[in-house]
Image (tube, rainbow, N blue to C red):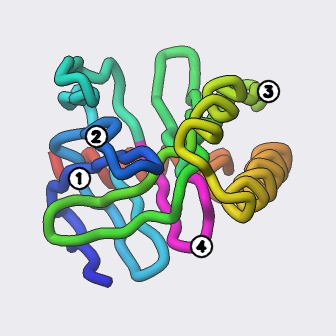
Amino acid sequence: MNIPTEGEVIQIQSYKHDGNIHRIWEDTTVLKATQNMIIVANDRVRVTESDGRSWITREPAVCYFHSRYWFNVIGMLREDGVYYYCNLSSPFVYDQEALKYIDYDLDIKVYPDMTFQLLDEDEYERHSREMNYPDAIDRILRRNVNELISLIRQQKGPFSAEFIDSWYERYLTYR
């Protein structure tokens, strides 16, 4: 697999299980890239939805992608603390076009006090039927929900106190 270079500005493309584009983030800066992990950041970037509508993000964000985990984590830096949005997704792939993954609907929102909430279970059930998610995918995603919850509770990995702050500081050196 190709990997982007640190400091490179890339696009992030999210797809659905049926292969249709879901969402595209522009102008995202690579902070660290290995075969197994990519950490990126952006601030006030254009996001284009599958229906063509677009919007601009409101705050800086540091994003964590891993090739072995079926989730990615977005840490959004707001005035009252870091909020996390975790997408249950396929592991990332990177080609010369973009960093890409399949979004599997389930999300976990984590608040600055590290309380969290599982979101979009109804959307997951609907899409699972409509797009015929295999049972193996369901098992993998359920296992990764538990993995995410464990990381959140232990405040490890992207949920550790210094993770977002230190990567955001690195991002500021590229601006």
Q: Which residue is mark 3?
A: 115
**Residue 44 place in picture, x, y as percent:** 23, 26
**Is 159 displayed left or right of 90 in the figure?**
right
Element type where label 4 sits in the image: loop
Of tags 4 and 2, which is closer to the observer?
4
Q: Nearer the viewer, mark 4 or mark 1?
A: 4
Q: Residue at the spot x=64%, y=38% of the render?
A: 129
Per the image, is 64 magenta?
A: yes
State the separation of the CA atoms marked 4 and 2.
23 Å
User: Which numbered marker is on residue 42?
Assistant: 2
Q: Residues within 10 Å of mark 3 (few under 14, many from 20)?
A: few
Task: Label 2, secondary structure: give it.
Answer: strand
Could you give the CA–CA distance between mark 2 and mark 3, rounded to whole angstroms?
25 Å
Which quadrant of the figure has residue 143? bottom right
Q: CA distance from mark 1 to mark 2?
A: 6 Å
| Residue shown at 43% from the left, 45% from the top | 16
Give the image location of residue 59, x and y in percent.
35, 24
Q: Main secondary structure of the magenta part?
A: strand
The numbered mark, 3 or 1, whose residue comes first in the sequence reads 1
Q: Amino acid at mark 2?
A: Asn
Q: Which residues are magenta?
A: 62-71
How crowded is the residue under tag 2: few (<14 C-alpha within 10 Å), some, or many (20+)? Answer: many
Q: Report whether 131 appears left or right of 22.
A: right
The disc placed on residue 43 is none
| Residue 22 image-quadrant placement | top left
Which residue is the site of mark 4? 68
Q: Position of residue 20 (x, y in %)?
A: 32, 44
**Looking at the image, is mark 2 or mark 3 earlier in the sequence?**
2
Viewport quadrant of the N terminus: bottom left
